[in-house]
Amino acid sequence: MKTVETLESNVRSYSRSFPAVFSRARGSIMFTEGGRKVIDFLSGAGALNYGHNNQEIKAAISEYLESDGVVHGLDMATPAKVEFMETFSSVILRERNLSYRFQFTGPTGANAVEAALKLSRKITGRHNVISFTNGYHGQSLGAIAASGNRFYRKASSIPLTGTTFVPYDGYLGSAADYLRKVLMDESSGIDLPAAILVETVQGEGGINVAGKEWLQSIQALAKEVGAIFIVDDIQMGCGRTGEFFSFEFAALSPDIVVMSKSLSGYGLPLSMLLIKEALDAWEPGEHTGTFRGNNLALVSGKAALTLYWRNQTFSHQVQRLGALMRRRLDAIAHQHGNKFAVRGRGMVCGFDCKTTEIAEATSRKAFAKGLIIERCGPTDQVVKFLPALTIDQDTLGQGLDIFEESLTETLNSARGS
């Protein structure tokens, strides 16, 4: 750790929260250089839905490397790209009666968000984007302009424009009603938007969950005012909420879907847009990126789709484990007089500790006991549960035990001080 502290920029984050050198990882377990075993409830911030070093996906990568397959090819055609698109189309899109074109963007989710906003503005000729309070879409200038967190926005050090924020109330409907009112009012002062950008579950914002009717009303309003309806499925896609897309439960058909994180299935950089064919208005080469053709990630992504999504078995397993995790967290909250709130869907849950201090101390104690778990929310007051979707029930239970012990110790210490 001394090398990290001496040579790496102050901007580093996770190495501060989890001060150890991690040398190996498999499944839901990470090992430090000293041999300490740690359960991982962080999962690469959602990039490792299928666990660390998934052996079957790893085999597909190894076979491709051994064959001298093209690793970097810009956006040239390769068997890896063709097979990924064919598999995604047949296994994911056709089974859900969805039809999209693929745009492979730069390697990060923020790259994909930038492309989605740029395309929406090109199509509509408008500038304004409707986003939601507590939303998070990345750190590049366009993406952070559409993100709510003041800490991240302030770091940009220039005015962030082009976005109108609306409260993310998810269920109550008042935000949707307000948005309709101002967009239909010629004197509201709110410019008609190029796009409405939404997460069905806000991850970094505090695990805030939107309901079916609310999401449907937002989609309908986008269509009514001629805006592109974009769902950011970067962290909540690829099965995190129990179905492959987080919007399936609401029967949505977004104009653009933004995907990244667990898309590669192995933690390799891969981001893309799914664009309705009628909206594919790009001119050739109009939006490019050197690393938009990560063939290793396409190989591992295809392997993940083949392994886990050819039928409903895996989806049902995720929903079952998610329900188990939710029941346990609800029981822990109840044990402490329901002064804490539990939110989530599928295998993403947030335990709202109400104060930053309780959440921070609980997370720190949990790491000392052998559990990696991060925090989210406007003031990092929510403990965020993102275990691998492939975690076994015993390991999930052990991690929840550590969380409960850590929370109890934190609360006892607070009472005694």
Image (cartoon, rainbow, N blue to C red):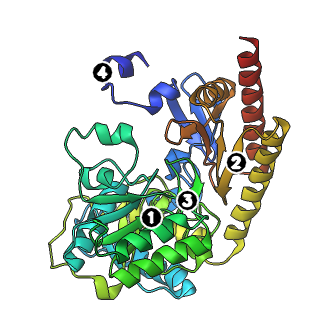
Residue type indicated by callout 4: Leu
> Element under label 2?
strand
Q: Are marks 1 and 3 in contact (CB under 8 Å)?
A: no
Q: Is residue 328 left or right of residue 9?
A: right
Position of residue 281 relative to residue 397, above or below, is below
Please identify, in this view, whether the residue under mark 1 or under mark 3 is nearer the observer: 3
Query: Is disc 2 in contact with disc 1, using a CB cutoff of under 8 Å?
Result: no
Of pointers 3 and 4, the one earlier in the residue sequence: 4
Q: CA distance from mark 2 to mark 1?
A: 21 Å
Q: Residue at x 59, y 60 (%)?
A: 240
> Which residue appears at 74% of the width and 46% of the height?
396
Looking at the rendered structure, which numbered label has been put on residue 7?
A: 4
Q: Residue at x 46, y 28 (%)?
A: 15
First in sequence: mark 4 or mark 1?
A: 4
Which residue is nearer to you in this view: 145 or 10? 145
Mark-to-mark CA distance, 3 and 4? 43 Å
Q: Amino acid at mark 3?
A: Asp
Q: Which residue is mark 3?
A: 169
Q: Which label sits on residue 198?
A: 1
In the rendered image of this protein, does residue 122 appear above or below residue 71? below
Where does the N terminus fall, quadrant-wise? Answer: top left
Looking at the image, tell me whether mark 2 or mark 1 is earlier in sequence order. Answer: 1
The answer to which image quadrant residue 355 occupies is top right
Indicate the position of residue 374 as horizontal and vertical percent values: 56, 37
Label 3: element kind: loop
What is the C-alpha distance between the residues marked 2 and 3? 16 Å
Name the residue beneath numbered marker 2.
342
Please name whichever residue, 168 or 51, is drawn nearer the observer in this view of the structure. 168
Nearest to N terminus: mark 2 or mark 4: 4
Front position among marks 4 and 1: 1
Do labels 2 and 4 touch, CB within 8 Å?
A: no
Where on the picture, by quarter, is residue 37?
top right
